[in-house]
Image (cartoon, rainbow, N blue to C red):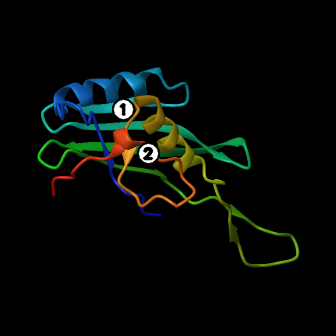
Amino acid sequence: QFDAPWTFSSASRDAAAAFDALVAAVEAAPDLAVAAVDRDALYLRATARTKISGRAASDVDDVELLISKEKGLVFHRSASREAVFFFPAQNIYSVPLSDDGTNRARLDALRATLGWESTAARSEDAEDDPRSYQALRY
């Protein structure tokens, strides 16, 4: 499922400092393990145990984050490597199980920890924060 990129460090737009903060936040997250860091490309890959219905599964989720210093954006994804299926006894067809939003929640928690904003449109009910008003460079 698509999620809009994030903006980082609205005051300074310093991509290197934002990447350092991102690495530190991922290293501090209890459910994430850093798998690869490329400081030149501003790319980070981490892994986490898949959770299905609140329980750890045998699969692994990949979390990837890429900072674009030219655009001032953070592109991200979190997805399971394999689909987990349930085979009901009365049915010969398998049913894929949902992660119940675990991947999205993991990314949302990381973004909130860093204090970064999403570029996604906000609902009219969302709290208005003037600090988030900034010109996006595309």
Residue at 57% x, 60% y: name it: 83
SS type, badge 2: strand
Q: CA distance from mark 1 to mark 2?
A: 9 Å
SS type, badge 1: strand
Q: Amino acid at mark 2?
A: Asp
Q: Residue furthest right?
A: 90
Question: Residue 54 got which mark?
Answer: none
Q: Amino acid at mark 1?
A: Ala
Horizontally, residue 21 falls left or right of residue 105, namely left
Q: Nearer the viewer, residue 43 or 56?
A: 43
Mark 2 and mark 1 in contact (Cβ < 8 Å)?
yes
Disc 1 crowd rating (10 Å Cα; few below 14, some 14-19, many 20+) is few
Question: Residue 62 got which mark?
Answer: 2
Query: Which quadrant of the view contains residue 36?
Result: top left
Residue at 82% x, 78% y: name it: 91
Residue 81 at x, y percent in the picture: 48, 53
Horizontally, residue 94 falls left or right of residue 120, namely right
Disc 2 crowd rating (10 Å Cα; few below 14, some 14-19, many 20+) is many
Task: Please give the count of numbered marks on the rendered protein.
Answer: 2
Q: Which residue is mark 1?
A: 35
Q: Nearer the viewer, residue 119 or 108?
A: 119
Residue 82 at x, y percent in the picture: 53, 56
Residue at 41% x, 25% y: name it: 25
Residue 8 at x, y percent in the picture: 29, 38
Query: Which quadrant of the view contains residue 86?
Result: bottom right
Name which of mark 1 and mark 2 comes first in the sequence: 1
